[in-house]
Structures are given as structure tokens and as C-alpha cells.
Image (cartoon, rainbow, N blue to C red):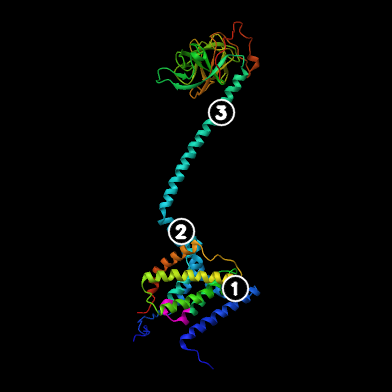
Amino acid sequence: MVAIPSRHKSLVLLAGVILLQVLMLAVQIKRDAEGRLIRVWTVGAVSPFERAGSSGFGWIRNTWRHYFALQNTTRENEQMRRENDALKLQIAQLQGKAAEADRLALLLKFRQAHAEVPMIAARVIGVSAGTASLTIQLDRGEHAGIRKNMGVITPDGVVGKVVEAYPNASLVLLLTDKESGVGALLADSRIQSPVGGQGEPLLVMKYVPNDDTVNLGERVITSGMDRIFPRDLPVGTVTEIKSGNPFKQIRIKPAANLERLEEVFVLLSLRPLEMKNEGNPADAQAPAPGAVTPPPAVRR
Amino acid sequence: MNDAFDIRGESHIEVHKFRAGAIIVATLLALVIQSSFPIHFAKAAVLDLPLLVTIYFGLSRRNPSTGLLLGMFIGLLQDSLSGPTVPLGLYGIAKTIIGYLASSIGARLDTEHPAARFALTFAFFIVHQGLIVLTRRILLAQPEPWFNMHLIVAALVNGLVAVFLFLLLDRLRKN
């Protein structure tokens, strides 16, 4: 037998090993299941270590991410906070717009229900700078047809009257101001009496004799006697009744939310107007004979 | 002469011996890390730690027979752990040849310098991938591209990692 030189032994071994593996490959290609046993043994032997290794690397990764690689986390955190703030702002804006849409829808409904009454919508752009008077400023003035002493209302009720009309703005004295007043009557008992402000959130009904019966919760509506507001507009609700000398002390909660006014209607007439009474048809009275519609004004 | 040293001819190249079980532990660790590390760090899949271990022990032991057998052993284990889509022998053949080449080159050159290690690992990685593609194309009839940029990047990364890994593995040598 021919002896293999020692320096060629490794080459022979290489050729043999390669040949063996090529044959193994060939067998596997021919029969798919071949070699499964080797895999099972290998995986069985190595998998516990793999499991431990995977857990170890997972722990290292988590440790790194949670305790060391916080630079990205901080940046992401800041970015998310910014996004969160932006979204909050967006939500607030959308909520504001939704609320405004609701209010405008109410105004529109009210306007359509009283299409025959000349009125103009205006936005509240300011409130009184001090506590001496309770006024609001509107974004419309003489150019829109607004004049001094015109009535201002919302769909909820009476707001006040225009005390100053500028070319593009106007000042409204709220019903709660001490100097303010409106001709009113109790809706049920039909007792007439002016209602005025006291510089407080609640109004006061004056000159109701002690003998007259007034109930808590009774509605107060305009009487039309002041020749500013049409009849039957809601003024408020009786919340407190006390006996006085010689008249009752009746406090009224305003129907309109005078502390949160954003849009109002200005009645474009200096003469008595007539409003349709939707809430209580029984209270509706005949139109005032002198009601005259003024010339058309710019309307929203 | 020290048992750990084997002077061959005039080249005075050392043959390093390792602590008992060092090769087995290093091989097992390489396989475990190779199969579990990319689960958590996907980019680590570019590394071929079993190949680096094959190259290192081939270069250090400088015995072609030992080198090719170690390469075959590591390659077959890697095949076994790579799932049914990788037939047994694919990595086995490639790593057998790499083990043989590394041992042969290690017996002729001083491969202790980091630059030499980097260059050799880079070259062996390319050859290793070439052998796999060759096996796939010829023996398995699976069309594979011979070259792409990813191969170069992977070779560079493996070369770089090898420099540090080999320094670590040097500590397993017997003094």
C-alpha cells in the first residue's frame, strides 16, 4: 500500500471530509427527512444554552434601554409631550369651535323664528374695564344700524340696552347694572313692575305690593312698557320673595347668562316691537299697534 | 522547549495551546450568541461568530487537520441550528475549508498583529460566503448572487469585531 506523505495527510483528510459532507447534502436533497436526527440532537443540546443566552441578552437589552440608553427616550418623551400639548390645544380649539357652532345654531334658530323682527347679531368683544358699571362691548355699531337705547337680547332672554353707539362698535349696559331697568311682568299673575339691576348677579323686581301673590320659580317676562323691548321676552325667574314695606322684595335670576355672553342680538328698532311667544302661547298678546319695522340694516 | 510552543523550520511561529475545554466553550458560546443575540439586536445578524471562532482557532493552532475538523464540527452545528431550510453540510463544507486555510496560513505567517487579523478575517469572510454561494448554486441548484455591497460591509464589520474578539480569546491561551 502506498504511504501518504505526512504533509499531504491534511489535504486527504480535507478531501474526505468535504466529500462526506457533499454526500450528506446529496442524500438530504433526495430525502428530505435525512439528517433530522442530527438536528434534534444538536438543538436539544444547544437550546438550553440558547434559552439562557436569549434571556441574558434580553435582560442586557432591557437594562440598556431602560437605564443607559435614555437619550432617545428623553428626546422621544419631549417629542411626545410636544405632540400631546399640540393635540390638547387642537382639542381645546375644536371644542371651542363646536361650542361656538352650537351657540350660532341657537342664534340662527332664534333669528329664523323671529324673522319679522329686525335684529342683528353681534359678537361680544369686551366687557367693562371696572366694577363701576356692568357693560359689554359689541363688534357692531352705527354702520350696522345700531343706535343708542336699542334693546339687546339672546335666545335665552333680555341682556340690556345700547348706551353708546360708535361707528363700528357699541356699548351695552347689562340688565344687572344699577342703572339698568326693563318693563316686566310676572307671567302667571300678570303683575306688572319694572325689573332692575343692583350691580349683582340677581335682579330685583320693584313695586309689587305685599298683598299680591307671587310664587317662587315664576317666570318674569318683558311687558313692552319701556318701549325698548318687545313684550313676552324672558327676563328671568323668581328665586327669592320677602315681605317689605310697602312692597315685596323679589329677587330674580336673569334668563340670559349675563356673565358668559359671546353672541347677542341687537333689536334694530327704537319703537315697540312684537315677538312671537313660542314658549307660552297663552301669554302672547296682540301686536303693539305702533310697531314699525325700521329700514333694512346690515345683518348676519 | 516548552510544550506550548512548536517551532517549525525557520519561521519561529508559535503554536498556541489553550486551557482545557476552552475551544468547546468558545464554540458553544459563539453558536449560542449567534442564534440568540440577533433576536434582541437585529443588526447583529451581520456577524458570523462561529466563523470568527473557526478562523481564530485555525490561525492559533496552526494544524490543518485540527483546523478543518474544528471547522467541520462548528459548521455542522451551525447547520443544525439554522433550521430545515439550511441543509446539513452547507456551513459545514465552507467552514471546513476555512478551518483548513486558516490553519495553513497560520502555519506560515505571523497572524498576531491586529491588522493581519483584520485583513485575514475580511478575506476569509468573503471566501466563506463565496463557498456558500458556490455550494448553493452547484450542489443545491439555488441561485444566489455572487456579490453585493452587503457582503463587503459584513466582511468589514466581522473583520473589525474579530480584532477585539481575538484579543479576548487570546486570554484563553495557556501561558
Asked whether disc 1 touches disc 2, contact meaning CB atoms under 8 Å apart, the reply is no
Asked whether disc 3 touches disc 1, contact meaning CB atoms under 8 Å apart, the reply is no
Q: What numbered label is drawn on residue A62?
A: 2
Pick whichever, A206 or B54, lies toward us. Answer: B54
- Helix, strand or loop at label 2? It is helix
Q: Tell me the chief SS of the magenta region.
A: helix
- Image spot of residue B157 (x, y percent): 44, 64
Residue indicated by mark 1:
B139
Q: What numbered label is drawn on residue A101?
A: 3
- Image spot of residue A93 (x, y percent): 50, 33
The range drawn in magenta is B58-67
- Locate the N terminus of chain A and report the quarter of the image it occupies: bottom right
- Tell me the subunit letter for badge 3: A
Crowding around mark 3 (Cα neighbors within 10 Å: few <14, some 14 to 19, many 20+) is few
Report the amino acid beneath label 2: Asn
Q: Relative to residue A100, is residue A79 depicted above or below?
A: below
Report the amino acid beneath label 3: Ala
Q: Is residue A227 left or right of residue B12?
A: right
Write the residue at 57% across / 66% down.
B144
Point out the frontmost of discs 3 and 1: 1
Pick whichever, A157 or A298, lies toward us. Answer: A298
Looking at the picture, do discs 1 and 2 lie on one chain? no
Pick whichever, A172 or B8, lies toward us. Answer: B8
Write the residue at 56% across / 28% down.
A101
| Distance from Cα at disc 2 to Cα at disc 3 | 50 Å
